Amino acid sequence: MTTLAPSTDFDFYSEEVILNPYDTYRRLRDTAPAVWLERYQVWAVTRYDDVYAALHDHRTFASGYGVALNDPLNEKMKGSALVSDPPYHDHVRGVMGGPLTPRALRKHHDYFQERADALIDHLLELGRFDGVRDFAQIFPLSVVPDLLGWPAEGREHFLDWASAGFQALGPMNERALRDLPTLKGMWEYMAEIVRPGRLAPGSWGAALVEAAEKGEVDKQLLPALIGDYLVPSLDTTVSALSTMLWQLGENPDQWRMVREDPSLIPNVLNESIRYEAPIRALSRYVTEDTEIGGIPLARGSRALMVYASANRDERHWKDPDTFDVTRSNANTHVGFGHGIHGCVGQGLARLEGHSLLNALVRKVARIEVGQPTWRVHNTIRAMTTLPVEFSA
């Protein structure tokens, strides 16, 4: 049975909604399973069960037509793992995913732990520091570029490139337009960096270039594929790590539980990603007439999967607005996406988060945090600054 489709003309991408999103998400969830956002001509899908089901139905809710809310970026990203459908998606993800399997990542465990221990020792010496710049940003930047085989030059642009790339996944509004020169510079650099010999031998990036030389992937797609490695490995991880630190500081009882029971460490990261999903939402293209909870969605329309809302849906989570490191179903979050397009780099993000938490548990007795400032960003839920003080 279908019902009358609800619509609204409010601005989902306004500064007000971006900075304080959760009341808006709740209103959308309570309105209907899918709500038409008139301003952006897209369906907002906000309830957990509906988002989860759509992410597991890649035939009806396809990614190959793009996941952004603007045509130029969708066209530019075609052929990447993110903007593709099976069978090509399975092939290219297989080529990219080799270094990111749990078995392949295991050999980096000691290296990551040594880097995490050194960072926490340094921050303890500082005492007070910025949790975004000195903790959440510096750790990914200290390990990811080397894994990709990146030369020394160009690394100073990584955070700006990642931010611009995610900014453009929303609508082509003033924010996205402002970042277009940065995005253009990234694409130009990517086209140059994938020339044979530019990336360090034996690195993940060099392996991808070798696959193109063998004809396993189209050489023309190499910039997009290298971008698939680089961009998601930075901004989303920075978001998750800063949220994790913020909540452990805001909830000393929770931090005490983790110190007393380090087996909670994997759950801490899952709960952090559930509580503040790094990616607000990405869209899917509706390939055939369908419905969500009785709301008809026409073929050719777009559906915005609002991960951040699904992760706070009262229909799935008990006390969803509470940060709880013992939450039994924290690992069911959709903060990394789900289905065939679940984040290919989530194992890397987990390795980073677990390494830092292991170091924190062993070295830091108390985490004190001040008020964070938040970035106004189309796609990423992330802080700009977070005052932190560690006590040994």
Image (spheres, rainbow, N blue to C red):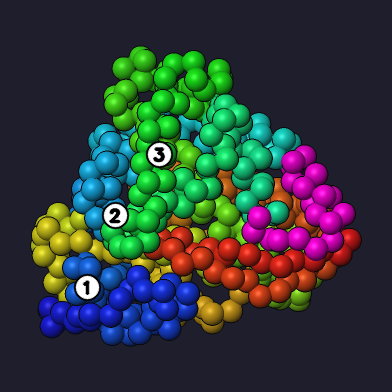
SS type, badge 3: helix
Give the residue at mark 1. Answer: 39
Q: Residue at x 47, y 78 (%)?
A: 20
Mark pair 2, 3: CA separation: 19 Å
Amino acid marked by disc 2: Ala
Q: Which residue is mark 3?
A: 185
Tell me how far mark 1 sits from mark 2, CA to CA.
15 Å
The mark that comes first in sequence, 1 or 2, is 1
Q: Earlier in the sequence, mark 1 or mark 3?
A: 1
Q: Is residue 197 placed above or below 104 in the rendered structure?
A: above
Q: Is residue 121 magenta?
A: yes
Picture disc at residue 230: none
Type of the residue with mark 3: Gly
Q: Quadrant of residue 217?
A: top left
Within-10-Å neighbours for mark 2: few <14, some 14–19, many 20+: many
Q: Is residue 147 visible?
A: no
Residue 203: x percent and y percent?
55, 24
The location of residue 367, given as percent across then percent down, is 78, 68
Residue under pointer 2: 68
Amino acid type at image mark 1: Arg
**In terms of sequence position, does the residue under pointer 2 or pointer 3 come before the other?**
2
Q: Is residue 91 left or right of residue 107?
A: left
x 46%, y 52%: residue: 163
Location of residue 104 in the rendering, given as x and y in whole percent from the top left corner: 57, 32
284 or 339: which is nearer to us?
284
Quadrant (top left, top right, bottom left, bottom right) of the C terminus: bottom right
In the image, is residue 75 above or below residue 226?
A: below
Quarter-wise, where is residue 315 in the image?
Answer: bottom left
Helix, strand or loop at label 1? It is loop
Boundaries of the magenta span: 113-133
Circles 1 and 2: CB distance less than 8 Å? Answer: no
